[in-house]
Image (cartoon, helix red, strand yellow):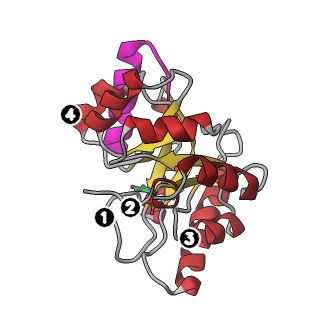
């Protein structure tokens, strides 16, 4: 297995200024997270609610946990107040529920809206027309306890780098269009894209947040 601390330091040195690293620790034990933490990593990504809730009390409390998996509505309440950011908000219904639960808990939750551009991959996320419509209609104005920091997306899972580049270009373009539609939207600008196999292309395409798991922690045992 790769040396986790070395890999973290290598990535920190390689990533340009303005691009943050989410170390995706799903399916890896708390000890692995601690190794990355000791090398200076502070943002970790998890995709399952139970797994994240188990790890949190075992680890330093200045870790910022990003939730990156499909979030079922019946689990929202469990992670409000525990997660620094929910990157995978894939429907308006989920967004409104996160807002209601955050209000109930007396907190504000940071989120990214997940967009669906890859042709054959995940079925989750807003379609480009849907997310643009959401902002054109200024539907975020009814949110009181949620801060939309930007968008998250995935490229097609393919060796065709032209395809991957085009997907990243589309995600970055959506973020720019949203800013043009709503220039008064404060603190909107995060573009979360890029994983172990494609993060260099994502950074070239305008990513500000890369989510890297396998390249840091090794293969996952599902
Ligand atoms: C698992 C996962 C990653 C990390 O993928 P790797 O290929 O292991 O780097 C990134 N983003 C999301 C949404 C994931 O579910």
| 204 vs 210: above or below | below
* Residue in the image at 63% along x and 39% along y: 39
CA neighbours of label 2 inside 10 A, class few (<14), some (14 to 19), many (20+): few
The segment highlighted magenta reads 92-110
The response on whether ligand 1 sits within 8 Å of label 3 is no
* Residue in the image at 51% along x and 21% along y: 61
Ligand 1, image quadrant it occupies = bottom left
Q: Secondary structure at mark 2?
A: loop
Do the residues bearing badges 1 and 4 touch, measured as CB atoms within 8 Å?
Answer: no
Q: Secondary structure at mark 3?
A: loop
Q: Mark 2 or mark 3: which comes first in sequence?
A: 3
CA neighbours of label 1 inside 10 A, class few (<14), some (14 to 19), many (20+): few
State how many labels appear.
4
The response on whether ligand 1 sits within 8 Å of label 2 is no
Q: Mark 4 or mark 2: which comes first in sequence?
A: 4
Q: Where's residue 36, x and y in %?
A: 55, 41
193 relative to 67 in the view: left or right: right
- In the picture of the structure, the residue carrying the numbered disc 3 is 198
- In the picture of the structure, the residue carrying the numbered disc 2 is 219
The residue nearer to you, when weighing 107 against 157, is 157
Do the residues bearing badges 2 and 3 touch, measured as CB atoms within 8 Å?
Answer: no
- In the picture of the structure, the residue carrying the numbered disc 1 is 123
- In the picture of the structure, the residue carrying the numbered disc 4 is 74
Q: Mark 3 or mark 4: which comes first in sequence?
A: 4
Q: Where's residue 123, x and y in %?
A: 30, 64
**Quarter of the figure with the C terminus:** bottom left
Let me know if residue 95 is in the magenta part: yes
Q: Secondary structure at mark 1?
A: loop
Do the residues bearing badges 2 and 1 touch, measured as CB atoms within 8 Å?
Answer: no
**Quarter of the figure with the N terminus:** bottom left
The residue nearer to you, when weighing 161 against 13, is 13
């Amino acid at each position: 297995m790769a040396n986790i601390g070395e890999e973290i330091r290598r990535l920190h040195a390689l990533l340009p200024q303005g691009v943050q690293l989410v170390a995706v620790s799903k399916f890896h034990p708390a000890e692995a997270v601690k190794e990355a933490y000791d090398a200076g990593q502070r943002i970790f990504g998890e995709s399952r609610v139970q797994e994240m809730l188990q790890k949190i009390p075992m680890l330093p409390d200045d870790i910022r946990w990003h939730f990156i998996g499909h979030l079922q509505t019946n689990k929202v309440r469990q992670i409000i107040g525990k997660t620094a950011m929910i990157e995978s908000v894939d429907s308006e219904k989920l967004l409104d529920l996160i807002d209601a639960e955050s209000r109930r808990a007396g907190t504000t939750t940071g989120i990214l809206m997940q967009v669906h551009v890859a042709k054959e991959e995940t079925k989750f996320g807003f379609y480009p027309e849907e997310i643009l419509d959401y902002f054109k209609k200024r539907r975020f104005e009814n949110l009181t306890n949620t801060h939309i920091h930007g968008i998250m997306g995935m490229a097609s899972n393919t060796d065709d780098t032209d395809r991957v580049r085009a997907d990243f270009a589309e995600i970055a373009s959506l973020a720019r269009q949203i800013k043009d539609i709503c220039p008064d939207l404060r603190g909107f600008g995060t573009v979360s894209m890029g994983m172990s196999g494609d993060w260099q292309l994502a950074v070239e395409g305008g990513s500000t947040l890369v989510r890297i798991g396998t390249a840091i922690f090794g293969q996952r045992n599902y």
